[in-house]
Amino acid sequence: MCTGLEVIFDVSGKQQILFVTFSSNFFPTSNSKLIHQSHFLLQKKKKMMSLEIPLKIASVAFALSLLSNSLLIYITVRCVKKVTGSYRRMIIQFSILAVIFPGLQIVVKPFSHNFKECMMFFSLNTSGGPGLQFSISVWVGLSTSIISLIAVQFVYRYLSFLDVEKARKFENLNTPLFWILYPFVPGSLYTASLYFLCQPDSYSDDYMINTIQENYSLNITNQSRFTILPFGVDGNLRWLNCSFIISATLLIFVHYVIIIFCGVKIYRYIKKELGKFSAKNMQLQQQFFCALVIQSLGPTVLLVFKVSIFLLFPLLAHFWNIDLSYQTGWFCSVAGLFPIVDSVAFMIIVSEYRLWIIKKFSSVFVTNHSSVSHSNGGVEIVGHVPVVL
């Protein structure tokens, strides 16, 4: 006698598992086995459903990032007059990367898991293939390019304040092209180091196969993946993985040193020279600086800080004998939110952007309100909306 039917889909929605439970009167000897099987498949269903959440977050993040950064690009190109030259190009470049990053995340579906001395970075996309594996490394490299571009903006603001002659070189024919292309250099280095130094092997697969099966019900050999396992049998160093940890740390560290150095110098200069500039000019420079600080905090808090901890955790787990198994891939979905935070913060802080948005929304509101008034036979006089810089 059939008492139930259940269909369970994996993350891709392609494969399905059917099982039928029978009453104990029909198969009295196999009742415990059926209960065990039912419990196992129910747990598997819960795992698959939970993995859909970060995928949905990534989709929402891409949609919002596309909307906010498209608006930022439009205002920068068509509306504002005080943002010109190299800084204008860098804002547009940053916005484009901020759209590509969460967009590629939807395709790659990155996830990670830390287990003892190993970190596995893999894709929830079941299509597999070397192209998907390379796309994972490109997605990770893009985050480094974004950090590098922020460092370039800090250098530009620093030179604009403290070395005007060098700042003018940004406006030369060749120099802007160099600074536009530069962020892709560390991004490419990060991509290449991950792709060539963290390829999975039999030892790393054996180390993680049971963990991935238990937590995700996935066959590790079918997933596009990278593994970071710095120590092998008997504690011997795995030099390829160790080289990646060193190179990745240096790439991020160098650019944050630049950001902190230039940021401190700019802050001290603004405080010191506050009275030597016109109020409007100083206010605008302060707004650009605050927007730049917020732009650096977004990827730092939502991406770099957390990833750095998980990246270095295999080393800590080895030396401190930490036994931990954790789904760290949830932070990958959160990483796609920082482009939204950065673009919205920039448009709120810089007055020329903020006033344009207020003006547009006010005009829409006034038009709609006026239409309603006329439709009711009323007469309405609309004044100007006061705006304070």
Image (tube, rainbow, N blue to C red):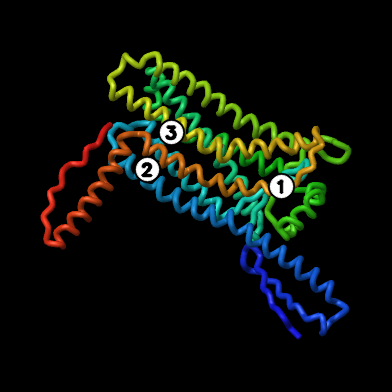
Q: Quadrant of the N terminus?
A: bottom right
Location of residue 233 (image quadrant): top right
- Of residues 120 and 129, the one drawn nearer to the viewer in this rendering: 120
Q: Residue at x 62, y 39 (%)?
A: 306
**Residue 372 as seen in the image, left or right of residue 29:** left
Residue type marked 2: Leu
Q: Quadrant of the C terminus?
A: top left
**Residue 23 as seen in the image, left or right of residue 352:** right
Q: Residues within 10 Å of mark 1 (few under 14, many from 20)?
A: some
Q: Mark 1: which secondary structure?
A: strand
- Asked whether the beta carbons under mark 3 and mark 1 sit within 8 Å of each other, the answer is no
Q: Is residue 251 visible?
A: yes
Q: Residue at x 77, y 35 (%)?
A: 239
Q: In the rendering, at what x and y percent does residue 194 appear? A: 66, 41
Provide the residue designation for mark 1.
Answer: 326
Q: Residue at x 30, y 35 (%)?
A: 352
Residue type marked 1: Tyr
